[in-house]
Image (spheres, rainbow, N blue to C red):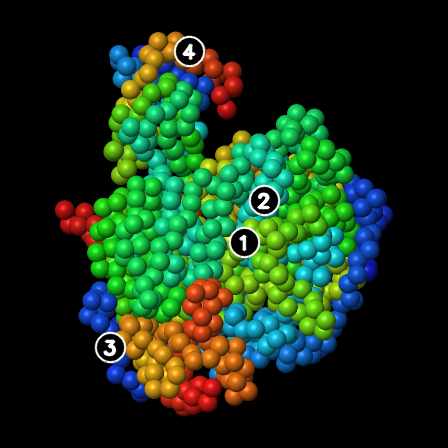
């Protein structure tokens, strides 16, 4: 069969004495490890022949869904195509074999790439300066909130202990705020899924450090009152932070900098096509307006004459947020993407994202109710509340979709919608793919009515079915050793 | 338009199906004052043109393949088995999403589980997470765990820990009620026991060492775990992970947490990223571990299955109660590390470590023989060491550039009192000829 | 659903059994149902002082973490060690073997600020508790 049923770990395929890689035999010196410093534990690593090791990993890869093999309608993730030219560029040794501590004069190609990427991000978002250092969206948020804190502290404004976050926000927003020492206050959404202005005014005071927003929000609709929201927040001396997770539909159409945002983070692994890698590496560059530049982390790049150098450390920098310069390999991929699509391409991206999302929305709203009854931007939310009457939850529909060859949409998020299914097709999906997805959803809706158990117990065609996550959390088995121990315990129990 | 399937006729078809006449009808919610921003950006290029551009940019870079590089200091040029590239180039791995749907992600999940197993074995500890952004952020997270676990306000860190790592910890702890204090190193470069004893107190949540330290010296931590634990603090160890195949592991030293830079395990130097922060703890600290973790369990049909676990700690569940805000990890880098450690295997890991020690020892002997240059030949090292030069380092850099050699990293930038000293690294990638050539060039300075 | 008469209840679904100034605390049957399978309990720290209504412990399911609030002000004097290896006790026997921690209550008379079983049952019915 095509997908291996062998679920053994590499350790379980090990055979003493086997090896893959050979190393040079010659020793040049008589080096030895002092007795008191030597490792004494055996190193129980797998011992495999290279063919077996290759088969092991390749067979593992075949147990995965991926963008290159399946449609991922995951809301807020922007699972667009990962262009192969990005990979071609990122693999070149003229970029991978550069040591981070080399002097800038020796790496002007790299420096120039970083400077041009920053230029591009500035223009697209309407901000004044970017740091390319943060390694992920959450890392960018952390950096952004540290900037908020430093800014207020510099003005002696020490009473600002609160950060406002919409109740529809992504979990990283409040988690980041708490990490930086703020108290998180939720702002209610109105019936049309947007920040409720009265609710906002009620909690806005001069103890608020900042309001964190994503626009469009996680329901896929634009905060049409954004200019008013910005005015209100600034009036109270607060800052406005933009979570760039949903930037895709705004490319070329509108810019967070123009909306009044003081700080922005961008997810390169979402909007800028760098691959998700199974959970990273990503990159979350942070852009700011002039008044926040003195606090930026370092190093920053700056053009000087014909070349590009490291800028002097900002006067009141919050310091480093990462070792060295950032996830360079990811930055290079985003740079190549920007070069390919260019200014004209930005509008095609946002247009495609919006059209595709509304097409799916139009076709699916008769299958399951939509959370907000108006055109969306790049994503929309369905509610499967009615299916709950048949004992079927949003998560079950996600599982059943796997059988139809589609990755599940985002399920049970945002929390403000009951039994939510968040769908974002992106601009790189063709109509044929979307039509197949629509058919699958219709089929599942039919199954919910006629044979709900089939949906409840899905999926049936994958290597595993409904791993027991309660057991996994109660009895954590996180390593091969843990597994051996569990198996020994189970074996004893059987004998006893 | 690259990557976008929508043709003109298809666009009109979609608009019809949606029931609007133009895109404008769909973006009405966006205030007109915001629309149509002026952006100074170049037009898109074709793929052949972009390839050309990338090649031209690359030509402006001098890499560790053009020059002979003896640069280390937290980023190391190691041999990476060809098979590793094959594995991480599999699109089923690289273009996959986070494994929130375990049925569709057993490849990623099992690879993470194997990575966790390998890291636990290498560091001699019980439980690993799926990785952090890099060594510095991983160490910062370890400091946060110590602060939370002991409910004490102080982190004690050796000054011989990588300067970037110390900086990031300070950034993370800035303006909290918690503080960071450093203890020093002796003239020989190893940590100063008296300095440590003087600062270890009832406020100390955790003590952080790096071994081999920033100067390349393998620290003797005999008695340290007892001393730190008697003080009811946590012991956190960082260090080049490949060295643990040869030298005492963090677990053997009695560490509670091992956190540091995993780049040497299968990632190229890549001008600083993407790298990998390893984070491994004892069983007792398992529930405090931040970040993603893969666990083994059973599925509904009794089969072995892997899934993300202990997620309630994570941001998307706990929201403001999370101990950390980490969302992404560095999954593909963890896969590279897993593949690296698997393809090297038990014997290969040991041999690589021995080769590092061998090449660095040979280089050190050669430099010791050069008039005017000083090295401490008896210090235990792994793959790098400090050289004291008779002339300012800038001079050496310039002279060796003419010979197409990167000689090392000046220490003065990070330790102002260590003038005319530089850090030299020789990994298993260096041959006898490489090292002899370097020594000859230095002798001419 | 069962709400024993001899206990007192909070709006956040904890119960307390007070004898003198020693109070035993757990979560109600309603709570354990809402939480669903408990996978981990962060055990309260002995000697920790807590104000009324402040978080004293955390109960985790696979999907979420729930703060457990002290029904009355006091000092934590004991916690249920059995939950370390068997967190499911909270679901199986929320009023008995699934108890969470014990408090030395500062002001036992404050007990009358809490709900009786009947009041709690009504509180649940009215949907105010969700």
Residue of label 3: A32
| Relative image position of residue A84 (x, y in whole percent) | 62, 70
Q: Residue at x 42, y 62 (%)?
A: B162
Numbered disc in front, either 3 or 2: 2
The chain ID associated with circle 3 is A
Residue at mark 3 to residue at mark 4: CA–CA distance: 72 Å
Nearest the viewer among A302 and B124 is A302
Measured along the vertical axis of the image, is residue A389 above or below residue A469? above
Q: Dot 1 lies on which element?
A: loop
Instruction: Using the numbered discs, state the Cα–Cα distance from disc 2 to disc 1 in whole angstroms.
Output: 11 Å
Check the image and report above or below for B269 versus C96: below
Q: Quadrant of residue A72?
A: bottom right
- Can you identify the residue that label 4 sits on? C113
Which quadrant: the N terminus of chain A? bottom left
Q: Which callout, 3 or 1, points to the residue nearer the camera? A: 1
**Residue A150 numbered mark, or none:** 2
Are discs 2 and 1 less than 8 Å apart at CB? no
Q: Chain of mark 2?
A: A
How much space separates mark 2 and mark 4, taking CA atoms? 43 Å
* Tag 2 and tag 4 share a subunit: no
Identified at 31% across, 75% down, the residue is B376
Crowd around label 1: few <14 · some 14–19 · many ≥20 (10 Å): many
First in sequence, mark 3 or 2: give its number: 3
User: Is A33 located above or below residue B206 in the figure?
Assistant: below
Asked if labels 2 and 3 touch by Cβ distance under 8 angstroms, the answer is no
Q: Which mark is residue B335?
A: none
Q: Is residue B422 left or right of residue A37?
A: right
Q: Is the residue A406 above or below the residue C28 in the image?
A: below
């Amino acid at each position: 069969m095509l997908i291996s049923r062998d679920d053994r770990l590499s350790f379980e395929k090990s055979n003493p004495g086997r090896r893959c890689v050979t190393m040079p035999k010659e020793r040049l010196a008589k080096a030895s490890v002092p007795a008191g410093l030597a490792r004494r534990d055996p190193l129980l690593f797998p011992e495999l022949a290279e063919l077996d090791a290759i088969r092991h990993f390749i067979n593992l890869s075949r147990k995965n869904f991926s963008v290159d093999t399946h449609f991922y309608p995951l809301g807020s993730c922007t699972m667009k195509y990962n262009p192969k030219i990005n990979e071609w560029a990122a693999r070149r040794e003229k970029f991978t074999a550069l040591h981070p501590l080399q002097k800038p004069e020796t790496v002007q190609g790299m420096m120039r790439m970083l400077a041009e990427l920053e230029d591009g991000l500035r223009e697209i978002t309407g901000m004044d300066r970017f740091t390319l250092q943060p390694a992920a969206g959450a890392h960018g948020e952390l950096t952004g909130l540290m900037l908020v804190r430093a800014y207020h502290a510099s003005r002696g404004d020490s009473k600002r202990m609160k950060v406002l976050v919409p109740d529809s926000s992504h979990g990283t927003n409040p988690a980041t705020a708490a990490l930086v020492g703020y108290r998180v206050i939720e702002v209610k959404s109105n019936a049309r899924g947007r920040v409720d202005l009265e609710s906002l005014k009620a909690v806005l005071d001069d103890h608020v450090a900042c309001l964190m927003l994503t626009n469009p929000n996680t329901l896929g609709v634009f905060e049409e009152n954004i200019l008013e929201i910005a005015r209100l927040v600034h009036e109270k001396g607060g800052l406005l932070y933009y979570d760039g997770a949903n930037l895709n539909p705004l490319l070329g159409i509108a810019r967070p900098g123009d909306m009044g945002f003081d700080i922005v983070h961008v997810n390169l692994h979402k909007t800028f096509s760098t691959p998700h890698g199974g959970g990273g590496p990503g990159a979350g560059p942070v852009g700011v307006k002039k008044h926040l530049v003195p606090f930026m982390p370092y190093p920053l790049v700056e053009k000087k004459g014909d070349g590009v150098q490291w800028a002097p450390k900002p006067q009141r920098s919050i310091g480093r947020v990462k070792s060295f310069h950032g996830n360079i390999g990811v930055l290079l991929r985003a740079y190549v993407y920007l070069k390919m699509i260019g200014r004209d391409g930005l509008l095609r991206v946002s247009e495609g994202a919006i059209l595709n999302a509304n097409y799916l929305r139009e076709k699916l709203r008769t299958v399951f109710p939509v959370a907000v009854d108006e055109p969306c931007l790049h994503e929309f939310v369905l509610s499967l509340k009615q299916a709950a009457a048949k004992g079927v939850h949003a998560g079950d529909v996600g599982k059943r979709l796997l059988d139809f060859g589609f990755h599940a949409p985002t399920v049970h998020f945002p929390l403000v919608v009951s039994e939510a299914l968040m769908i974002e097709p992106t601009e790189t999906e063709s109509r044929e793919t979307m039509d197949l997805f629509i058919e699958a959803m219709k089929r599942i809706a039919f199954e919910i009515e006629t044979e709900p158990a089939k949906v409840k117990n899905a999926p049936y065609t994958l290597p595993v079915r409904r791993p027991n996550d309660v057991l996994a959390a109660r009895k954590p088995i996180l390593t091969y050793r843990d597994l051996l121990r569990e198996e020994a315990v189970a074996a004893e129990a059987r004998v006893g | 338009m690259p990557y976008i399937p929508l043709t003109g006729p298809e666009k009109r078809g979609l608009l019809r199906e949606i029931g609007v006449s133009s895109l404008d009808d769909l973006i009405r919610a966006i205030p007109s004052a915001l629309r149509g921003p002026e952006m100074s950006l170049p037009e898109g290029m074709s793929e052949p043109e972009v390839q050309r551009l990338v090649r031209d940019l690359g030509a402006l870079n001098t890499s560790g393949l053009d020059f002979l590089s003896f640069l280390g200091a937290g980023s190391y040029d190691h041999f990476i088995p060809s098979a590793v590239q094959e594995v991480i180039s599999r699109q089923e791995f690289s273009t996959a999403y986070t494994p929130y749907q375990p049925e569709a992600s057993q490849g990623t999940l099992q690879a993470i589980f194997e990575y966790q197993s390998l890291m636990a074995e290498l560091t001699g500890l019980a439980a690993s997470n799926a990785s952090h952004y890099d060594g510095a952020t991983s160490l910062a997270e370890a400091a946060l765990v110590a602060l939370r676990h002991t409910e004490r306000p102080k982190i004690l860190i050796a000054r011989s820990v990588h300067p970037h790592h110390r900086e990031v910890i300070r950034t993370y702890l800035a303006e909290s009620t918690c503080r960071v204090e450093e203890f020093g190193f002796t003239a020989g470069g190893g940590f100063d026991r008296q300095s440590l004893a003087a600062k270890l107190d009832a406020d100390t949540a955790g003590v952080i060492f790096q071994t081999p330290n920033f100067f390349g010296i393998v620290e003797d931590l005999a008695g340290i775990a007892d001393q730190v634990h008697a003080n009811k603090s946590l012991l956190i160890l960082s260090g080049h992970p490949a060295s643990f195949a040869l030298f005492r592991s963090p677990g053997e030293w009695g560490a509670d947490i091992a956190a540091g830079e995993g780049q040497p395990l299968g990632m190229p130097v890549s001008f600083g990223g993407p790298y990998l922060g390893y984070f491994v703890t004892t069983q007792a600290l398992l529930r405090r571990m931040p970040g993603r973790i893969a666990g083994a369990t059973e599925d509904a049909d009794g089969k072995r299955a892997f899934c993300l676990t202990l997620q309630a700690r994570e941001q998307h569940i706990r929201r403001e109660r999370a101990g950390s805000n980490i969302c992404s990890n560095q999954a593909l880098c963890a896969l590279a590390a897993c593949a690296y450690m698997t393809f090297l295997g038990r014997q290969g890991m040991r041999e690589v470590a021995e080769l590092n020690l061998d090449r660095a020892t040979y280089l050190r002997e050669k430099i010791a023989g050069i008039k005017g240059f000083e090295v401490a030949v008896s210090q235990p090292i792994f793959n790098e060491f400090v050289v004291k030069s008779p002339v300012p380092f800038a001079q050496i850099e310039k002279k060796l550039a003419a010979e197409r050699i990167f000689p090392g990293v000046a220490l003065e930038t990070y330790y102002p009192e260590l003038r005319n000293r530089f850090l030299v690294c020789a990994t298993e990638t260096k041959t006898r000829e490489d090292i002899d050539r370097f020594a000859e060039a230095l002798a001419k300075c | 659903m069962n709400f024993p008469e001899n206990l007192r209840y909070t709006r956040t679904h904890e119960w307390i059994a007070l004898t003198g100034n020693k109070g035993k605390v757990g979560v109600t049957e309603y709570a354990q149902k809402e939480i669903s399978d408990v996978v981990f309990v962060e055990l309260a720290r002995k000697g920790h002082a807590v104000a009324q209504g402040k978080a004293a412990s955390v109960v985790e399911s696979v999907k979420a973490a729930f703060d457990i609030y002290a029904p009355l002000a006091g000092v934590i004097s004991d916690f249920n060690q059995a939950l370390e290896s068997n967190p499911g006790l909270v679901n199986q026997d929320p009023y008995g073997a699934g108890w969470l921690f014990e408090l030395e209550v500062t002001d036992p008379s404050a007990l009358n600020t809490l709900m009786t079983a009947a009041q709690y049952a009504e509180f649940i019915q009215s949907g105010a508790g969700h």
